[in-house]
Amino acid sequence: MQRTVIIESGEDGMYNAYSPDMVNVPIGIGSTADEAKTDFLNTVNEMREVYKEDGRTVPAELDANFVYKYDLSAVFSMFPFLNMSRTADALGINASLMRRYSTGEKKISQQRIRSIENGLHHIGAQLQELTLI
């Protein structure tokens, strides 16, 4: 079973991780996307333990494989080695606009999200082809 986990930045500057398609909704919170992801997984593990301690069957959704989806701010938090301005340049996006997307100051369309996602995947594919000497 596979479950989607959303990792996004909150208005308070903290990051949240949650799975909207789970009945038992574990939540992770952290000052970085990675901390929120780790807290989410810790919450899932704690929920499993409670079921086991109570002698109840652990719901299958708590034993799922999790697939993570990030908002733009969480991407740059999760991968801090990505320079937002240089990434924007590489993707042909104005760096200032990318920052506004990342902070939520500017609403980002689904088409633009897919464009950025595809661009990041292209960069990843280029890195996979890399051979060091």
Image (cartoon, rainbow, N blue to C red):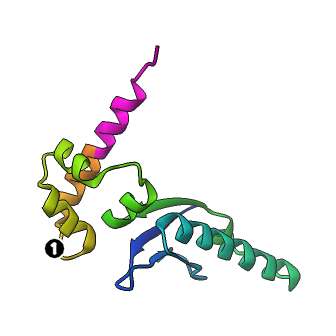
Identify the residue shown where x is 23% and y is 46%: 86
Q: Is residue 71 visible?
A: no
Q: Identify residue for label 1.
A: 106
- Give the quarter of the figure containing the N terminus: bottom right
Residue 79 visible in the current orientation: yes
Residue in front for this viewpoint, 112 or 29: 29
- In the rendered image, the vertical position of residue 77 relative to residue 83, given as above or below: below
Q: Residue at x 86, y 86 (%)?
A: 54
Q: Position of residue 30 (x, y in %)?
A: 53, 75
Q: Position of residue 123 (x, y in %)?
A: 31, 38
Decide: is 57 above or below 132: below
Place of residue 31 in the rendered image (x, y in percent of width and height, measured from the top left): 49, 74
Front-lying residue, 126 or 4: 126
Q: Which quadrant holds residue 28?
A: bottom right
Label 1 crowd (10 A; few <14 / some 14-19 / many >=20): few
Q: What span is in magenta?
A: 120-133
Give the total of numbered labels.
1
Could you tell me which residue is drawn at 56 percent across and 68 percent down? 35
